[in-house]
Amino acid sequence: MHVSLAEALEVRGGPLQEEEVWAVLSQSAESLQELFHKDPSAMGFIISPWSLLLMPSGNISFTDEYVTQQDLRAFTAPEVLKGNSLTSVSDIEKMHMYSLGMTLFWGADYEIPHSQPMELGEHINSLLLNMCDDITLSRISLRTVLDISSKHIRNSSCDPPFSYIRRLVRTVIFFFYRPQHLPVYPLVSVFLPFVLFLHTSLVYFSLKNRLY
C-alpha cells in the first residue's frame, strides 16, 4: 500500500518542510536510478504530486495510474509539451528531473498564502531551480542530484531520509484513526480498507530496522 504526496499533504494541510524536501528528493532520485538500471523503457510516467508514492518502508515509487483526472502540464517538461521526441536515456532522465523538481516546489509551497514565501534554504532552492531549467542541456543530471543530496544528508544532523517518508505515511494513518474525521474526509472510502495494512507494514519495517 502507498500514499501519494498529494494525499499526505492534503491530510496535513500544510507544505513539506525543508528536510522533508531533501528526504523526498533523495529517495526519489534513488528510486529513479534503480528504475533506469532495471528498464529505461518503463519510464514513460510523469512525476507529479499524484504519481509520487510514499511507501511504508520509507522508499518512493511512481505510477501512471489514478492521475488521469489531474492537469499535469505544470509538471511536464517543456520539451515534452512541445512534442519533441525523447531519443535517449539522457532525454528521459532530464524529463524526470524537471517533473521531480516541479513536484517538490509544489510540495514546499502547498497551502502557503501567496503573500508568504516558501521556507526553503538557498541550497535546496537553487538545486530545484536547476532541475526545472527550461533548457534540457542545462538541466541538472540525476547523478548530480544523487551526489548533492547524499552530501547534504552526510553533513547534516537530520534523521535518515526514509524516516521522513514514513512519518508522512503515518500522517495519513493517524488521521484515519481519529473517528471525528471519518464522515467528512472525501478520500475515506478509498483509504479506510487499507489503514490496518499500512499500520502493520510500518510496525514491520520499524522492527526490522531495529533487529538489523
Image (tube, grey):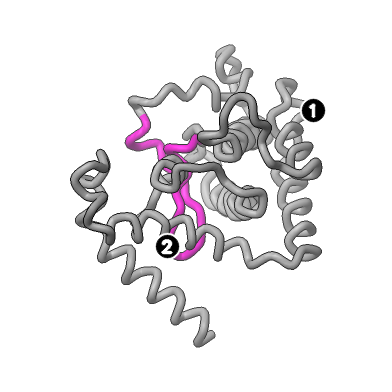
Relative placement, left or right, of 181 versus 45 is left
Q: Is residue 96 above or below residue 192?
A: above
Residue at the spot 39% in from the left edge and 46% down from the top edge: 11
Q: Does any portion of residue 33 appear in the rendered image? A: no
- Which amino acid type is marked by label 2? Pro
Disc marking residue 35: none
Look at the image and tell me whether residue 90 can be seen. Answer: yes
Image quadrant holding the C terminus, namely bottom right
Say which amino acid is labelled 1: Ser
Q: Is 63 colored magenta in this rendering?
A: yes
Q: Which of 122 and 154 is in front in this view?
A: 122
Q: Residue at x 27, y 58 (%)?
A: 178
The part of the image, by quadrant, that contains residue 64 is: top left
Q: How far apart are marks 2 and 1 (CA)?
A: 35 Å
- Name which of mark 2 and mark 1 comes first in the sequence: 2
Q: Which of 139 and 117 is in front in this view?
A: 117
Pointers 2 and 1 in contact (CB under 8 A)? no
Name the residue located 42 percent from the left edge and 62 percent from the top edge: 56
Taking depth in this image into account, of 101 and 21 the one nearest to the observer is 21
Q: Badge 2 is on which residue?
A: 56
Dot 1 corresponds to which residue?
A: 138
Q: Is mark 2 on a helix, strand or loop?
A: loop
| Front residue of 158 and 136 | 158
Range drawn in magenta: 48-67
